[in-house]
Amino acid sequence: MSTTILGIESTAHTAGVGIITSEGTILSNQRSVYIPEEGEGIHPREAANHHSEELPKLFKKALDEANLSSKDISLVSYARGPGLGPCLRTGATAARAFAYSNDIPLLGVNHCVAHLEIGLLEGAKDPVLLYLSGANTQVIAYAAGRYRVFGETIDIGIGNGLDKFAREAGMGFPGGPKLEKIAEGDELIDLPYSVKGMDLAFSGLMTAAKQKLESGYSLGQLAYSVQETAFAMSCEVSERALAHTGKTELVLGGGVACNSRLREMAMTMASERGVKCFVPEKALCVDNGVMVAWLGHQMMNADYQITEEDNVVNQRYRTDMVEVTWR
Ligand code: AMP
Ligand code: MG
């Protein structure tokens, strides 16, 4: 029997409500992004205020677009972490209010695992995920009952790094797509390439780029060089994860995976290794409610038993804390 699942995303800057069927047909993907004031980073409480104002509208828009009423929904799934505390609590409150008032089961899921699972909807079976988002940067693959983190950032997320450099260069949020637009040239400016074992560091790279900007290098060339360096680092670690696990599929996820140059580099690396590269559409790469709904469905479909702990938010809910029972 076909069922319909509603998912709520609120871990950071994006409030999202998505609706998907148990067959994987996306009925709606409504999003609203909190944009900090010019020159500022994300204020967790202001982002949460944004979400509490937007979520009721997003519920309505999603149900309207899907041409459904709340009684057609068989599961409410929300991202219980990792993320910013006030944002998580706002999403959880909205999820509880909607689920309890309509007598629908409620399940809190892991945001990073949701990014991975939506990639499987593209047809990948057992991939390495290169997950590049604002706050998170991880290379993930399934092994022995869990999604294991093979490599990750040891300081800031790649997207937050791009946003920070862009902000310092006088560009608004989100900086990643703005840098992509102005990236030009083919002359690589030397910047720190920090791959440590399987881990990555972006902070020094962004600081060096800012210093080079102040000493007169062109912004377009720096944007180009930051992208080339940060993306090459990310592809290198992914390639090593592919080599180590012997997996033959690569999936891209996270907002930075919207970047055309990153996509091109990942596809080149994959094709040179004989690996298939899956690139979800942009609306599914960025934070969204659809991926949250889809993961909730995967779990319940495998007879997952909801516990009380599943409905408590967890700011530090790591990818490898989730026992993967649905594969
Ligand atoms: P997420 O946290 O997964 O929703 O992703 C948000 C992050 O993705 C922000 O840091 C954005 O700057 C970044 N981002 C979005 N589009 C692009 C792009 N085209 N190039 C680089 N970064 C991007
Ligand atoms: Mg994300």
Image (cartoon, helix red, strand yellow):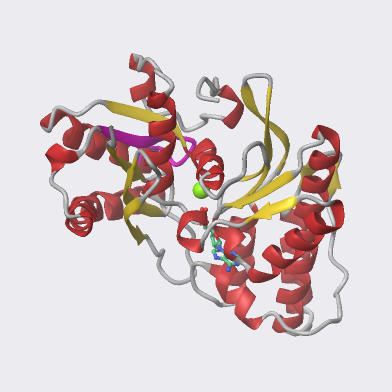
What residue occupies the far front of the structure in this picture? 1
Region in magenta: 75-86
Which corner quadrant holds the C terminus? top right
Point out residue 151 in the picture as x, y percentages from the top left corner: 74, 38
- Residue for point 44% across, 41% down: 84
Position of residue 225 relative to residue 100, above or below, is below
Q: Answer whether residue 59 is visible to the viewer in this image.
A: yes
Q: Quadrant of residue 104?
A: top left
Q: Position of residue 111 (x, y in %)?
A: 48, 39
Q: Residue 152: x and y, percent?
A: 71, 41
- Horizontal side of residue 282 vs 275, given as left or right: left
Placement of 325 over or under 56, stated as above or below: above
State which quarter of the image contains the N terminus: top left
Q: Position of residue 136 (x, y in %)?
A: 59, 46
The quarter of the rendering in which ligand 1 is drawn is bottom right
In the image, taking residue 190 as reference, residue 281 lies left or right, namely left
Is residue 167 in view? no
